[in-house]
Amino acid sequence: MTMLVFVTCTNPEWDFGNNLVFPLLRCSRFLRQRKIVHSACSNPMAYFSSGASPTIYARQYRHSENKALPYGIVAARTSNSEMRPLWDFGINNRISKHRLNLLAIAGVKKKEMVHKIVTKQVFDIITWSCYILFMLKRSHPIFHEETNIFFFVNKLKGIAEKAVSRNAPQSIYDVFVSFRGEDIHHGFLGHLFKAFSQKQINVFVDDKLKRGNDISHSLFEAIEGSFISLIIFSENYASSRWCLEELVKIIECKEKYGQIVIPVFYGVDPTDVRHQKKSYENAFVELGKRYNSSEVQIWRNTLKISANLSGITSSSFRNDAELLEEIIKLVLKRLNKHPVKTKGLIGIEKAIAHLEPLLHQESEKVRVIGIWGMGGIGKTTIAEEIFNQICSEYEGCCFLAKVSEELGRHGIAFLKEKLVSTLLAEDVKIDSSNGLPSYIQRRIGHMKVLIVLDDVTEEGQLEMLFGTLDWFRSDSRIIITTRDKQVLIANEVVDDDALYEVRVLDSSEALALFNLNAFKQSHLENEFYDVSKRVVDYAKGIPLVLKVLAHMLRGKNKELWESQLDKLKRLPIQKVHDVMRLSFDDLDRLEQKYFLDIACFFNGMSLKVEYMKLLLKDYESDNSVAIGLERLKDKALITISKDNVISMHDILQEMGREVVRQESSEDPRKCSRLWDPDIIYDVLKNDKGTDAIRSISVDLSAIRKLKLSPPVFDKMTNLKFLYFHDIDGLDRLPQGLQFFPTDLRYLYWMHYPLKSFPEKFSVDNLVILGLPYSLVEKLWCGVQDLVNLKQVTLCHSKYLKELPDFSNATNLKVLNMRWCNRLIDNFCFSLATFTRNSHLTSLKYLNLGFCKNLSKFSVTLENIVELDLSCCSIKALPSSFGCQSKLEVLVLLGTKIESIPSSIINLTRRRVLDIQFCSKLLAVPVLPSSLETLIVECKSLKSVVFPSKVTEQFKENKKRIEFWNCLNLDERSVTTHKYLSALEHDYVEYYTSKAH
């Protein structure tokens, strides 16, 4: 489709005057100067239908009283040369400020009509033409400066070229060579094609035509499918009607699709070709005798156009070798502008944009780039795309696929021979076991080479292939893909800045990839919109998963989609898991154990590495667990956030669970880890537990009828992790419980129905204890060895009266007693005692909210970070409160506190202070400058003091400050709050008017 963007304006006196017209005319001049438009013509419709190239056209029109011209018209010529207006809008149409909202800009009322008329190819041009109109109507200063016009015109030209390129056939070949074989000796052609091959340039030659095809049609398809056409004009080139027909097609592709054309004048003068002199004149004399004049004239015109193009003349070089070198150099230069062929490779642009600068960055030694990530995430695809894009810049290139698999199947000698033979473009035999022979190193060391090693699984594989890397040229590049980050960072093979982790696709990319594979298009079918979104959500952005699901569902009706989606929620996708399991099988026994524990129990619990080190270790050391977790991370089987929280992708979790299912496929009750409610019901109901069970995780609400017998856990001597979520609060132990496994590390039981633990239960190994909403009154008696205990959650345990002895809980970090409203003041006395004796020094998070019987809090905790005393009955904080230098969050909501100690200013890390509903509080002393959030709602409050530094910080950074219903604030506090609230809040006027 040929396209025109046509912008008009009316008489300068009409509507917006000279401020519009003069900038428009200046813009029009720039458009013409930059060869985007032709000369102004009186009949734009005729101009458009003439078949001109994609064009932007600007022209001034005078206003007619009989017919007001519209501000703008965007039109397109269809195949039958009819003009069809795409947009037509006048002065009464409101133009949206959002330039991408095309419907609003154009004033189009019916969306359906737009979809019928506007094709994807013209979308960007329409957008920008509408934006021109919007800018002009606003007399935007973009048109006042020539530099701005220059930028704008280039942007618009780029959009137009992009739209045109979308119509071009997909490039199959890098280069099509048009030549007269009788003129050029075979040695030159042979060296030319060999040079193309060595540079990984995909060139079309006649022997690629399939027999039986129409030769003319096949050649024309090859020309259309090439990115560059290389024309070798020789003495008798014009004598061949076949060569001339090729030339016509090449110039047609240049005009129509923007194909790059490089003429080479081999033994002829460009002037002779351009004006058909000497041998070319003689050729056309003969052509005139055999063909009609109109056809001959087309050939003459085409030769003239071709010879006017910038090219290469053989007479400028001393020999064919130099000529070949220049041809290859120019072709490579043009190919570097070749767009990446990313059709169907959604999201790959980000990876290429990140990796390209790394590959072109100068270095003192060979640069190694590492691409790592989980199986099926797209590492190989990215490496292939990068390789195809830049390989032409190197003297030798080799892509070794599936290195580990090939190594195991054929041995190291096979891989070395394949690598060296490809780089040197000759057959080479290698016998050495480690590294490469010195003479091979010397030869390759003189070359600029690109090597891709795909799917490397062990550190030693690189040494086996190359020995050391110091013999490579500094401008050579090696790309390694692996599932294991350790392969890349071991022995400092890859610098930190040269590591690239392939991450999952974001939601929009995932949906586009799924649609391409399910519907062969990037947009959703309306009928399948909801179910497609759910399938994509299930795949979690993993490309392989998305492709497998898309191919599984393609061509099926919506009902079958729904049915398959229901199965997906319960069953694994075997093809995906086969790939994912490759990473799992590479782990050692302990690493596999850690992976399965996370997959079957811990995933989703947001636990940090320091917790997991205690939870996962059996007889090994903490360091062994830490190293194992790093291995899982490096293999992309888990992720560790900046806060050191461990998580696992859902698909990987399901793969891990499938591994556990296979432990005892005939009797799943004998598996090491249980999570399925039906299986757990059978095991617990019938006391079928065994010492093989390592973890149980279940929502008891899914098995409401379950009642547990006293010996239910007696046989589970190796049970380490127990998670019972139970929102129903049913009594599951009507006859009590006689045994808990002594090796329990994680115990969470919501609505635990007993008053205490079993008598012989040892809590020495507990790391996390959670009994929310329990009926427990007392946990254990006497001093216990609690050195492993990290977290205790007893919130909403309304019958809990006292805490156990925490004197040995030196590593306890989290203590949540919220809504334990029978807890008495003795708790704080004992807590203070522990603190004075250097116990609980690790405590960071203490929540005593709604423990209404607590009236005193005299504890100082040197490492406390968050303290919640909401709705306690305390009236004061200790004077030493400011010594808690690490405190960041203090919540005093609803307390009876009357004053805050002045030492609070020493809390230099404090970010949040919440003093809502403190009915007795009269004053807030000078606040620390670190404060980010202050929430106040106290009718009794009279003054709040901010230091000058904090007021400036609030003003500058727009930190959160909220005063509600503070009716008795003094004038100074009101003035300060007005200053702080000026940008965002209007609360001041409300309470000030009430106060005065």
Image (cartoon, helix red, strand yellow):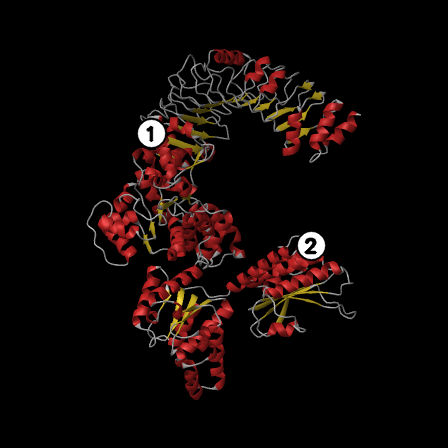
Residue 17 falls left or right of residue 680 = right
Closer-to-camera residue (776/537): 537
Residue 634: x %, y % from top left: 37, 38
Residue 288: x %, y % from top left: 45, 86
Closer-to-camera residue (88/684): 88
Residue 795 falls left or right of residue 172 = right
For the image, the number of numbered tags is 2
Per the rendering, the mark at residue 536 is none
- Vertical order, 262 against 816 (above or below): below
- Vertical order, 75 against 535 (above or below): below
Residue type beneath disc 2: His
Mark 1 — residue?
624
- Vertical order, 528 against 978 (above or below): below
Residue 254 falls left or right of residue 442 = right
Residue type beneath disc 1: Ser
Closer-to-camera residue (583/55): 55
- Quadrant of the rendered image containing residue 182: bottom left
Instruction: Using the numbered discs, state the Cα–Cα distance from disc 1 to disc 2 in whole angstroms.
Output: 65 Å
Mark 2 — residue?
140
- Quadrant of the rendered image containing residue 196: bottom left
Can residue 828 be seen by looking at this rendering? yes
Label 2 CA crowd tier, 10 Å (few <14, some 14–19, many 20+): some
